């Protein structure tokens, strides 16, 4: 119940703030576009606490051929992760880093949560971006697209790459545990 009250309060505050901001700054302005792109992130972060949600199944699957290290390096996803590591933005979700948790398996649900928030923030931000294009608000469209790329698309793909690495590490750990157990030691892998 507490999480729902916080969500309702936060949603109201975000909606009122954006409404007041739209009266002060034209909705076709790049400054409004910047604010409008970050509101879904805040909204979804509080919603997740009240009612956890995920990414649709099709997008939730980690496909190894899609997230290999070389492809991520070429797309700049690894560089994005290195840059993010050295900024205050890291403090926004400390549980998606191994230093904050004892085991990689503890990081996995937090990485999935962050993935879901960035995925749906992208989806919720797209109507405004489309509106900017339809009405030829090119500066607002450019800012919206840049914010979508930097605050939703790259974080989503970086989290996806991180999750694939975590799953590999967890899989190796379980294999090692199986081999070290008496039953696993008797198994033959010929």
Image: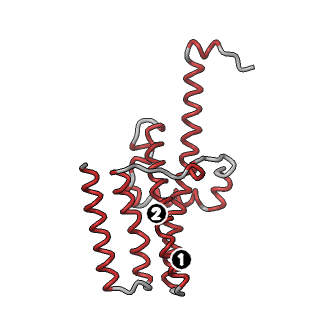
Q: Tag on residue 121?
A: 2
* Residue drawn 55% across the image and 83% down it: 134
- Depth order, front residue of 166/21: 21
Q: Tag on residue 99?
A: none
Residue furthest to the right: 190
- Depth order, front residue of 175/47: 47
Numbered circles on residues, count:
2
Say whether marks 2 and 1 touch (CB < 8 Å). Answer: no
Secondary element type, mark 2: helix
The quarter of the picture where the C terminus appears is: top right
Residue 131: image location, x then y, percent = 50, 80
- Depth order, front residue of 26/102: 26
- Viewer-nearest of labels 2 and 1? 1
Residue 179: image location, x then y, percent = 60, 20
- Depth order, front residue of 76/37: 37
* Residue drawn 54% across the image and 55% down it: 158
Residue 74: image location, x then y, percent = 66, 60
Secondary element type, mark 1: helix
Reply above or below: 8 against 174. Answer: below
Q: Earlier in the sequence, mark 2 or mark 1?
A: 2
Which image quadrant is residue 106 in?
Answer: top left
Left or right, 47 with reference to 61: left
* Residue drawn 51% across the image and 76% down it: 129
Badge 2: residue crowd in 10 Å (few <14, some 14–19, many ≥20):
many
Residue 143: image location, x then y, percent = 49, 78
* Residue drawn 55% across the image and 82% down it: 133
The residue indicated by pointer 1 is: 130
Q: How is the image coloured?
A: secondary structure
């Amino acid at each position: 119940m507490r999480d729902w009250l916080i969500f309702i309060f936060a949603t109201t505050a975000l909606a009122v703030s954006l409404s007041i901001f739209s009266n002060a700054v034209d909705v076709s302005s790049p400054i409004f576009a910047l604010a409008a792109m970050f509101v879904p992130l805040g909204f979804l972060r509080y919603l997740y606490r009240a009612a956890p949600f995920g990414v649709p199944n099709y997008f939730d699957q980690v496909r190894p051929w899609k997230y290999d290290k070389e492809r991520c390096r070429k797309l700049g996803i690894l560089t994005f992760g290195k840059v993010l590591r050295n900024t205050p933005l890291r403090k926004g979700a400390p549980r998606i880093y191994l230093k904050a948790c004892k085991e990689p398996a503890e990081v996995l649900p937090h990485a999935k949560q962050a993935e879901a928030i960035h995925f749906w923030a992208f989806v919720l931000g797209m109507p405004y971006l489309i509106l900017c294009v339809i009405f030829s608000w090119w500066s607002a469209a450019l800012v919206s697209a840049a914010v979508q790329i930097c605050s939703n698309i790259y974080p989503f793909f970086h989290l996806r790459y991180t999750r694939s690495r975590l799953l590999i590490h967890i899989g190796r750990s379980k294999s090692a545990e199986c081999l070290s157990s008496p039953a696993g030691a008797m198994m033959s892998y010929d």
